[in-house]
Amino acid sequence: MRIEKFQDFIKYKFKNQNLLLQALTTPMYGNEQGIPNYDILETLGDAVIKLIFSLKLYNSGIRDPDQLTKMKQCLENNKTFLEIASEMELEKYIYSSNSQQIEGTTILADVFESICGAIYIDSENNLLTVEEIIINKFIHDWKIFLERPLTFSKNQLLEFLQEKFKFTPKIKYTSKKIGPDHALEWILESPIILDPNNKEIIRLPSALKSDIFKTKKEAEKDLSLKILRYLKELNI
């Protein structure tokens, strides 16, 4: 049984098995079966994870509010959680609809957060339990979050281009929706950089595109960061 195997995997026995079942159930499957899904636990887990990492920074001697804010902003990006969930092979334990693609999607990141939320509730609101069972065990270098500066990537890109061309360029791209409306995801591709007269000023690779994200805004941040890295590698 998936629930038993997952508890053996993380070495934590749930007092309330239904909480774990809910944490591992996608909204689509939950709606099909008429059972609770991970939505609320994901929201709770997101807040729990941010607090744990903020406390880690504070307890490591950081007293700068800007660094704590930066940590929170970095955690708003699901890319790291997706990577961790993939390494944990969470797709083996998730209850999903037959039509759903799980591997490589943000569903994995959602489930990672929902598991943290479920453990928090099951342990009677014990942050240390979540930290010991999930965070410390599966996130080996928590400072990696500070190396994911997606939040300001669009501004950084525009500032970089403004300095090079002495005007404010326009960045256009093609946006693509993936999945059903209730679980919509975004990918942005085919970016072009234009001058104020809408003339292309830099030829970007046609293969340059964002990863898949739950919001268009997150996808735009990711694509901006990739464009910036590409331009810096070219030494433009």
Image (cartoon, rainbow, N blue to C red):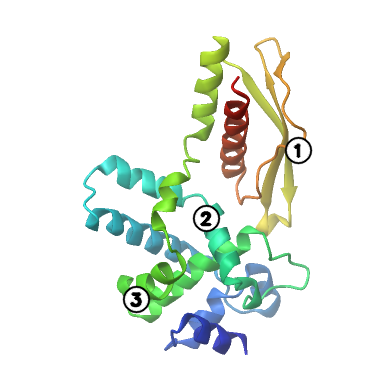
Residue at figure coordinates x 57%, y 27% from the top left: 232
Circle on res. 48: none
Vertical order, 91 against 64 (above or below): below
Q: Residues within 10 Å of mark 3 (few under 14, many from 20)?
A: some
Q: Earlier in the sequence, mark 2 or mark 3?
A: 2
In terms of image quadrants, where is residue 124?
Answer: bottom left
Secondary structure, mark 2, is helix
The three-letter code of the residue at mark 3 reads Thr
Residue at disc 3, secondary structure: helix
Q: Which residue is mark 3?
A: 129
* Marks 2,3: beta carbons within 8 A: no
Q: Residue at x 24, y 48 (%)?
A: 62
Q: Name the residue: 61% across, 17% down.
A: 169
Task: Bin the neighbour count of mark 1 within 10 Å (Cα to Cα): few under 14, some 14-19, many 20 and up.
Answer: few
Image quarter where the C terminus lies is top right
Q: Which residue is mark 2?
A: 80
Q: How many marks?
A: 3
Image quadrant holding the N terminus, namely bottom right
Up-down relation of residue 68 to residue 20 (above or below): above
- Which mark sits nearer the N-terminus, 1 or 2? 2
Question: Residue shown at 49%/65% (left/top)?
Answer: 113
At label 1, the amino acid type is Ala
Cα distance in 3D space between marks 1 and 2: 22 Å
